[in-house]
Image (tube, rainbow, N blue to C red):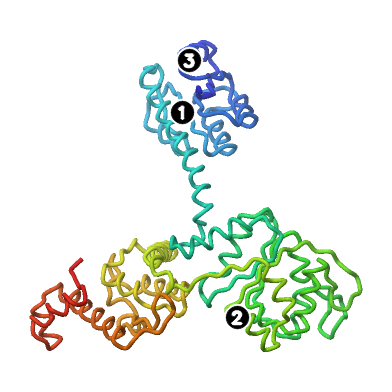
Amino acid sequence: MKANILVVDDDPGVLGALSELLKDNYLPIPVSSGQEAIDQVQKKSSLDLVLLDINMPDTDGIETLRQIKTVDPNLDVIMVTANNTAEAAIKTIKYGAYDYVTKPFDIEDLTAIINRALEKRNLTKINQVLKKEIDVVWPPNIVGGSPAMQTVYSLIEKVTDAESTVLIYGESGTGKELVARELHRRGNRADKPFVAVNCAAIPGELVESEFFGHEKGSFTSADARKIGKFEYTNGGIIFLDDVGELPLPIQAKLLRVLQEREIVRVGSNELIKVDVRVVAASNVDLKELVKQRRFREDLYYRLKVVPIDIPPLRARRDDIPLLVEHFVEKSCERHHKPKKKVEPEARHLLANYNWPGNVRELENMLEMVVLLANGDQIMASDLPSNILTNQAMIETVDHEGEVISLKKARHQFEKQFILRVLEKLRWNQTRAAKVMGIHRNTLIIKMEELGIRRQ
């Protein structure tokens, strides 16, 4: 299919000649003024490129260029000028022109510039399509490609447009709110509010007012009507974090809201209809709270229509290198620091630490390291002492969740300890053996037994 090229020139002779030259390979659309060009861009979404004369009597080329880029920032414009000066070129590029040609122009040169501009536009379109396809399986706000996270992405994709409640399980710091926000971003409620509520942070006596609002005079400090979170979120998604912390009386009222889709403000008898999708989250087992009679069983099942389990970071170690790269780059940008690389020994330590605080702990730690590390590399010595001493590096359970033997734990420790010493001493086996107080031959045998080889 031929590309649509808008040709703009107030000289009828030039306009006709240029259109004639282009018609064999492209579909020229000739107009004779800047305003006509702007009108065409506003009403015609299928334009692929603009050839724009810089000197026109009504609206000059620079102003026309500026307005075209305002309407469609992705539409490339090639400026045509009789003034072959650096000043003219700088001015056009400053306002977003792709390139410029001078009159009289060589048709081969002009064709080459046109083809480059069209190729760039096609690549941009392809990238946009690919980005949408990639976003289906790899949300931009959640980093990780492990099988466990792919399962999470698949669930997100399946239920984004559903009306069902979602219950997100995960340890503290695993990114439960990110998953909730991704459900909102992808779904048919994306243009409506997303309201996050930390249920554990609201005093028990204020939860009802926070959730459902109150009328003026309904209690001592109620000096004005207040709209609650559910009413404010109408049409959107409300995220109830730490939902297990809600008092039992509020749990009963929340259940009614989920069933009847209506609320009553404190101090009022008026029923107010609300259209809100509820996404809840918990870092404790709600089923266990049900057994302890601290959480309503009917509410538990009403919330758990779609359960999403987010694995802890120690269960998806393959994602740690990706997360490290992401957070280091993010912190460098935020704090206006030069880009930093993480050297191999530091990467090894980070990948093998257990991260009890999960992704949040990793992000906060890397932000501190970026701020304090010298030079353009993050070294092992820049890491906090708990990571350097590997206090959490020895696994206590295997892949099936079974407690490992003391022999296996000792095996893990020896391997990690010897590997660290060798890396620290640049794999000088004689020096490493001396530091560890063993014979070099003993070290070589240990390395063979433990499968230690220089990377």
Residue 402 lies, with reference to residue 45, above or below; the image says below
> Measuring 15% from the left and 86% from the top, which residue is drawn there?
436
Residue ID for mark 2: 285
Q: Position of residue 372 (x, y in %)?
A: 35, 74
Counting residues from the start of the chain, the first of labels 3 and 1 encountered is: 3
Q: Position of residue 444 (x, y in %)?
A: 12, 77
Q: Amino acid at mark 1?
A: Ile
Q: Position of residue 11 (x, y in %)?
A: 53, 14
> Measuring 51% from the left and 47% from the top, which residue is drawn there?
133
Q: Amino acid at mark 2?
A: Asp
Name the one closer to the observer, 318 or 77.
318
Quadrant of the rendered structure where residue 191 is?
Answer: bottom right
> Measuring 44% from the left and 64% from the top, which residue is drawn there?
334
Quadrant of the rendered structure where residue 319 is?
Answer: bottom left
Residue 441 lies, with reference to residue 323, above or below; the image says below
Crowding near pointer 2: few (<14 within 10 Å), some, many (20+)? Answer: few
Residue ID for mark 1: 78
State the SS at label 1.
Answer: strand
Counting residues from the start of the chain, the first of labels 2 and 1 encountered is: 1
Residue lying at the far right of the rendered structure:
269
Q: Amino acid at mark 3?
A: Leu
Residue 284 lies, with reference to residue 96, above or below; the image says below
Please identify, in this view, whether the residue under mark 2 or under mark 1 is nearer the observer: 2
Name the one closer to the observer, 225 or 154.
154
Name the one closer to the observer, 125 or 160.
160
As drawn, the label of residue 18 is 3
In the rendered structure, are the residues bearing label 2 and label 3 in contact, judged by CB atoms less than 8 Å apart? no
**Residue 246 shown left or right of residue 388 in the figure:** right
Estimate the spatial distance between the alpha carbons at disc 2 and disc 1, rounded to whole Å.
Answer: 62 Å
Q: Position of residue 118 (x, y in %)?
A: 45, 30
Estimate the spatial distance between the alpha carbons at disc 3 and disc 1, rounded to whole Å.
Answer: 13 Å
